[in-house]
Image (cartoon, rainbow, N blue to C red):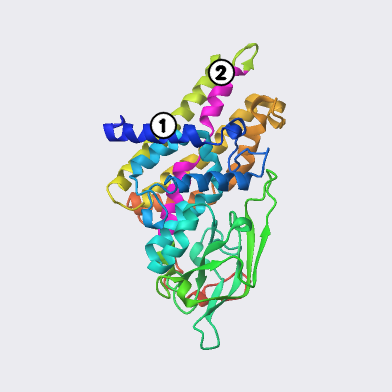
Amino acid sequence: MDFEDTPEEAAFRTKARTWIDANAPKHLEAELKRAGFASSGVESEDPMAASKAWQKKKAGAGWACLHWPKEYGGGAYSPIERVIWGQEEGVYGALSGPFIIGHGMCGPTVMAWASEEHKQRLLPPLASGEEIWCQLFSEPAGGSDLAGLRTKAVPANDSSGDWIVNGSKVWTSGAQHSQWGLLITRTDPNVPKHKGLTMFFLSMDSPGVEVRPIKQANGQSGFNEVFFNDVRIPDSQRLGAVGQGWEVSLTTLMNERLSIGSGMSTGFPELFRFCLEAKIDGRPAVDDSAVRSRLAQFAVRQSGLKYTGMRAITALSKGQTPGPENSIGKLVAGATMQELAMFALDLQGQAGVVQDADSPMNARFQGMLMRSPATRIEGGSDEILRNIIAERVLGLPGDIRVDKTVAFKDIPTSGRSKA
């Protein structure tokens, strides 16, 4: 692959850079440079308001969701131009955090499966940041087995054609800020677990929906429990056919793993900068051979992630959809983040826990370490991703799954009630 800009790409880069220089919220630049994983770093004003203002300004100028069609609020640019935009947006890209799930996962699913009427209604305000979406997939009893979900959707006992939903979800990022959610449910327990699922989208303001934020180890509450008590959903808000939910969910999951893997920061640039500045026995840390050895290991992984991401971008530029190979980026990035944070804290010692603007790295590596276990679970745990890579990329024999052809209601539940 030629990584140099073509004349057309160079012209686009100049156009993007000029607009960003003229419109970016530069008063937030210093704070954004201190952004942590899953946090914009903005404290001088409401971070959500700052994110929405920047997204709205981008949308007004045609820079929102660059790869989406214009009729849905996008810019109709190529995948390569989208990458160039991300490079030029730089630290201001941290303001996009609240919209990642909607733009990278829910939006593509709606685009692929919803009616034209719903696409016209839902996608433009999603692109502009006016409305935020969440992904209602994981459940307390399911673990990493998404197809083991127990949230039920049954036809309403009237002539409305609506569905009545009861159950709960967990691990739902951004639900407390969301206006809409993608919801996967079980509509038929009498068939094998992958075949009895149906996907819907619903308003998070629907009667019977309750969101409870979860306090995390890093002090944030990005994840939530969501409960459904006789929630009514019109059949017109179903995505795909009844029983086709697993197929619809794969559209979301493939985009999810691409979005997480390609957008996840491992913290390597910050670690490298720290090692240039920090001292060990009065000398720069980078002069220590053991430190250089670890930096080299992390640099190799960072390079591999970069070029694996470029391979995915090349596939997208040829009109291909994200495939199972994109699980590699997420798998490697999550483990690298955790290892790197532990190594950085070993170098920092007690100073690594001090959270203050004048302290070294402002406890960035501590925050990264406390957040990193979640990155190895969300979007598919390490074990799930390894199975996907082994079976669907390398073609190795699959694990023995004795429940694959068993009706869901007949699967043992280890003391839990059956569906």
Q: Residue at x 60, y 44 (%)?
A: 50
Compared to residue 231, the image places residue 356 above or below, namely above
Query: Crowding near pointer 1: few (<14 within 10 Å), some, many (20+)?
Result: few
Q: At label 2, which amino acid type do we have?
A: Leu
Give the main secondary structure of the magenta stretch.
helix
As drawn, 230 above or below 39: below
**Alpha carbon of mark 2 to alpha carbon of mark 1: how far?**
20 Å
Magenta highlight range: 251-278
Left/right of residue 304 with respect to residue 6 in the rendered view: right
Quarter of the picture containing the C terminus is bottom right
- Mark carried by residue 303: 1
* Residue 117, percent from left and from top: 41, 68
Please, is residue 272 above or below residue 304 in the view?
A: above
Classify residue 278 by image quadrant.
Answer: top right
Q: Earlier in the sequence, mark 2 or mark 1?
A: 2
Does the magenta segment cover residue 111?
no
Q: Which mark is residue 276?
A: 2
The answer to which quarter of the image holds residue 46 is: top right
Q: Position of residue 40 (x, y in %)?
A: 60, 40
Q: Assess whether residue 259 is covered by the magenta stretch.
A: yes
Which residue occupies the foreground of this view, 32 or 219?
A: 32
Tag shown at residue 262: none
